[in-house]
Amino acid sequence: MTIIKMTAAEVARKVIDNQPLFILDVRNHDAYVDWKIEGHNFEYLNIPYFELLDGVDNVLSKLPIDQDVLVVCAKEGSSIMVAEMIAEAGRDVFYLEGGMKSWSSYLEPIKVGDLRGGGELYQFVRLGKGCLSYMVISEGEAAIIDAVRFTDVFTNFAKQKNVDIKHVFDTHLHADHISGGRLIAEATGATYYLPQKDAEEVVFDYTAIEDALTVKIGAAQINVSALYSPGHTIGSTSFIIDGKYLLSGDILFIDSIGRPDLAGLAEDWVGDLRETLNVRYRELTEELIVLPSHFMKIDELNTDGTVAKRLGDLFAENHGLNIESEDAFRHIVTDHLPPQPNAYQQIRQVNMGKITPNYDEQTEMEIGPNRCAVR
């Protein structure tokens, strides 16, 4: 029988389209438990590859014959070896090209909606890392918010749409992934914006984001308005797009709220987080559609693959928005923090421009799940 490679893009389409897939993950158990490919209709079997070196006979009976079987490892080598043994036993089988490294890197652009005057808003979903980036398009111009480091994805998409990237924003100084914002701006001549309170240690030029800053995109005059919203970082800033969408950065997620500790200042910033969520956001119209910069689990995806929800619904359903007392909020936030993101201190240094790791080093820094939220 045959062994066939499956790309990260093909796996992503199975996730978004709610298709079935059986995954045989041959990484070590602790790596699998910490981080795996998630799908609404996926099934899993985790057997470390070293347990299969003598053959796969004991595994074959556990593999379905009525759906695709995908073998997954860290970089693809071990999955090819196991997949070859399964094929030799007479079964069709796939392996993930590039392994979990390729899954961590893949971005799926999805249209969120139309804007006034023929504009469009796109969300770039990084399924393997939980990162969400955005592109606002209007009459030949584009703005990007919270771009990840795979800059070609954004510049190539802009070319496909025949638009020029004029503005690039980061809602805050990221600590869980490396920003591509500054490099995109340098490559395109766009203006790069960063909250000034997060930029005290950066070593490059930027344009400061201030509260109530308004940038117009294209002749259609789509407003990208800044709303100071500290708590995840001291400079965290949200954006309201076209009076319809709230890009909440890492302050508010669909099923949780942002963590305040990635600069080591949880006790100092937890009060800012509460004020943003319970004062600044409460003053906004509940009809705004919240578009966060991360998601935590596959259940947060809508049926079209986007991560978005009405602000009023989050006020009713998100547990982080329904903690009444300040003491209870402080206790819940500071006592329920997940492990720190992988290499988050080094990632902050990269995003400040202080260190410049090579591509492989950047990949290793970002390996693992999203950990920006309070559990």
Image (tube, rainbow, N blue to C red):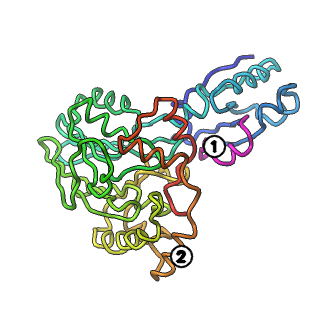
Query: In this image, 259 relative to 113: left or right?
Result: right
Which residue is at the front of the view, 314 or 324?
Answer: 324
Q: Work out whether mark 2 precedes mark 1 in sequence or the reverse, and give the earlier one.
A: 1
Res. 362 mark: none
Tell me, yes or no, whether the highlighted magenta stretch contains residue 99: no
Residue 126 vs residue 372, the one in the foreground: 372
Under tag 1, what secondary structure?
Answer: loop
- The residue labelled by disc 1 is 36
Percent across and percent down for residue 59 are 83, 33
Indicate left or right for 85 with 243 as reference: right
Segment colored magenta: 25-41
Question: Does 47 sit above or below residue 1?
Answer: below
Looking at the image, can residue 299 be seen?
yes
Q: Are marks 2 and 1 in contact (CB under 8 Å)?
A: no
In the rendered image, residue 175, in percent from the top left (x then y), is placed at 45, 50
Front position in the image: 320 or 150: 150
The image shows residue 188 at horizontal and vertical percentages of 24, 30
Q: Amino acid at mark 1?
A: Lys
What's the residue at 30%, 54% (across, down)?
Answer: 200
Amino acid type at circle 2 is His
Quarter where residue 191 is shown? top left
In the image, which is nearer the foreground, mark 2 or mark 1?
A: 2
Q: Which residue is mark 2?
A: 331
Question: On the image, which quarter does residue 97 sit in?
Answer: top right
Looking at the image, the residue that sits furthest to the left is: 219
Residue 33 is a magenta residue: yes
The image shows residue 74 at horizontal and vertical percentages of 64, 33
Quadrant the C terminus occupies: bottom right
Q: Is residue 22 left or right of residue 90?
A: left
The local crowd at label 1, few if under 14, some if 14 to 19, many if 20 or more residues have their Cα within 10 Å, is many
